[in-house]
């Protein structure tokens, strides 16, 4: 994962829990946290700069996450194969 701090890129490794499966989507939020959707594992929120897992969200009915969008208010919209979910 390459992270840009406004001046330069740095290479960071993802936590092992995230490297065993396919990453379906990745985005950041207004608090500069990284959100990673992992096939079959749900949604992870990571802190910067250390990329430690802060939160793990399982989707209802084990829905697969297909897309992520953080709106200008800071809500995280999660597109799944079972519809759209909102995390705020």
Image: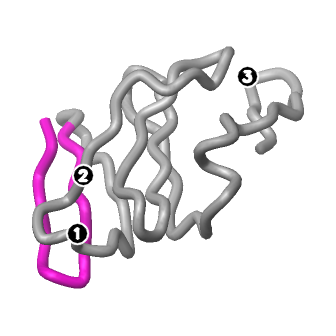
Compared with 14, 59 (above or below) is below
Q: How is the image coloured?
A: one colour
Question: Any mark on residue 76, and which?
Answer: none
Q: Position of residue 35 (x, y in %)?
A: 45, 43
Query: Which residue has dot 3 on it?
Result: 5
Q: Quadrant location of residue 6?
A: top right
* Tag 1 near tag 2, CB within 8 Å: yes
Looking at the image, residue 3 sits to the left or right of residue 17; the answer is: right
* Tag 3 near tag 1, CB within 8 Å: no
Foreground pick, 29 / 42: 42
Query: Which residue has dot 1 on it?
Result: 62
The residue at the point 77 percent across, 44 percent down is 1
Please provide the residue range marked out in magenta. Answer: 75-88
In which quadrant of the rendered image does the C terminus lie?
A: top left
Which badge, 3 or 2, is on the more N-terminal residue?
3
Q: CA distance from mark 3 to mark 2?
A: 30 Å
Local crowd size for mark 1, using a 10 Å CA cut-off: few (<14), some (14–19), many (≥20): some
Q: Position of residue 14 (x, y in %)?
A: 71, 38
Question: Any mark on residue 58, and which?
Answer: 2
Secondary element at image label 1:
helix
Q: Position of residue 78 (x, y in %)?
A: 25, 61
Compared with 29, 35 (above or below) is below
The residue at the point 81 percent across, 31 percent down is 12
Foreground pick, 55 / 8: 55
């Amino acid at each position: 994962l390459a992270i840009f701090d406004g001046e330069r890129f740095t290479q960071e490794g993802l936590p092992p829990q995230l490297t065993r499966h396919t990453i379906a989507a990745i985005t950041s939020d207004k608090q500069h946290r990284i959100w990673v959707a992992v096939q079959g594992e749900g949604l992870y929120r990571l802190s910067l700069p250390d990329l430690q897992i802060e939160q793990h969200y399982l989707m209802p009915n084990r829905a697969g996450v297909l897309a992520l969008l953080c709106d200008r208010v800071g809500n995280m919209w999660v597109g799944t194969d079972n519809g759209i979910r909102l995390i705020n």
